[in-house]
Amino acid sequence: MMNTINVQIENLNSLLLSVADSLDSLTFESFDTVFPRTVNAMKQVHELKGKMLEEYGYSQLKQYEKELLPKAKQIEEKFDNIVKVFSREEKRLEKELSTTLQRKKLTLYKR
C-alpha cells in the first residue's frame, strides 16, 4: 500500500509541476493552447486527489502535505498574477477602444 501511495504522490507532484510550468509559459499569444491544457491538468490533480482521499483518508495523506502544499500555493499565486495581468490588459484595450471610438465620432462630427 505504501508503494502505491508513493507512486500516486509522485504523479500528483508531477502534475503540479506541469501546471506550474504551463502557467510560466502562458502568454497572450499562447493562451488558447496553453490554458486549456493547464485546466485539464488541474482537473487531473483534483481527480487524483479525490481518489487518494477516498483510498487513504485525510490523516494518511496529511504526511505528504509539506511536499505538496508549497507547490499548490505557488500555483495559486501564479493564477492570481495571471488574472491581474490579463485584467490590466483588458482595461488597457477597453480604454484604447473607447478612445478610438471617440476619435471616430469627432471625425464624423467634423465632416
Image (cartoon, rainbow, N blue to C red):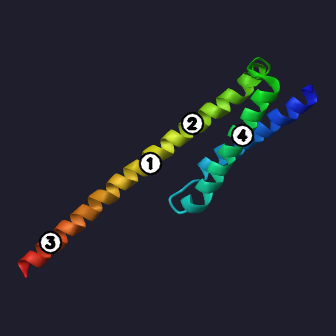
The amino acid marked with disc number 3 is Lys
Are the residues flagged by discs 1 and 3 in contact, CB closer than 8 Å? no
- Where residue 60 sits, quadrant-wise, is top right
Name the secondary structure under disc 1: helix
Question: Which quadrant holds residue 10?
Answer: top right
Is 20 left or right of 111, judged from the image as shown? right
Question: Where's the C terminus, which quadrant?
Answer: bottom left
The image shows residue 14 at horizontal and vertical percentages of: 77, 41
Q: Give residue 47's mark.
A: 4
CA–CA distance in space, label 3 to label 4: 53 Å
Crowd rating for badge 1 (residues with CA inside 10 Å; few <14, some 14–19, many 20+):
few
Q: CA distance from mark 2 to mark 4?
A: 18 Å
Residue 39, label in figure: none
The answer to whether mark 4 and mark 1 are in CB contact below 8 A is no
Marks 1 and 2, how far apart in space? 14 Å
| Mark positioned earlier in the residue sequence (4 or 1) | 4
In the picture of the structure, the residue carrying the numbered disc 2 is: 76
Helix, strand or loop at mark 3: helix
Mark 3 surroundings within 10 Å by alpha-carbon count, few (fewer than 14), some (14 through 19), many (20 or more): few
Residue shown at 24%/68% (left/top)? Answer: 100
Is residue 95 placed above or below 111 in the rendered structure? above
**Residue designated by label 3:** 105
Q: Earlier in the sequence, mark 3 or mark 4?
A: 4
Q: Which residue is mark 1?
A: 85
In the rendered image of this protein, does residue 29 appear above or below residue 48? below
| Total labels drawn | 4
Residue 85 x/y as whole percent? 44, 48
How far apart marks 1 and 3 lie (CA) works out to 30 Å
Q: Nearer the viewer, mark 1 or mark 3?
A: 3
Q: Which element carries disc 4, helix, strand or loop?
A: helix
Asked where in the image residue 94 lies, by quadrant, the reply is bottom left
Give whichever of discs 2 and 4 has the lower sequence position.
4
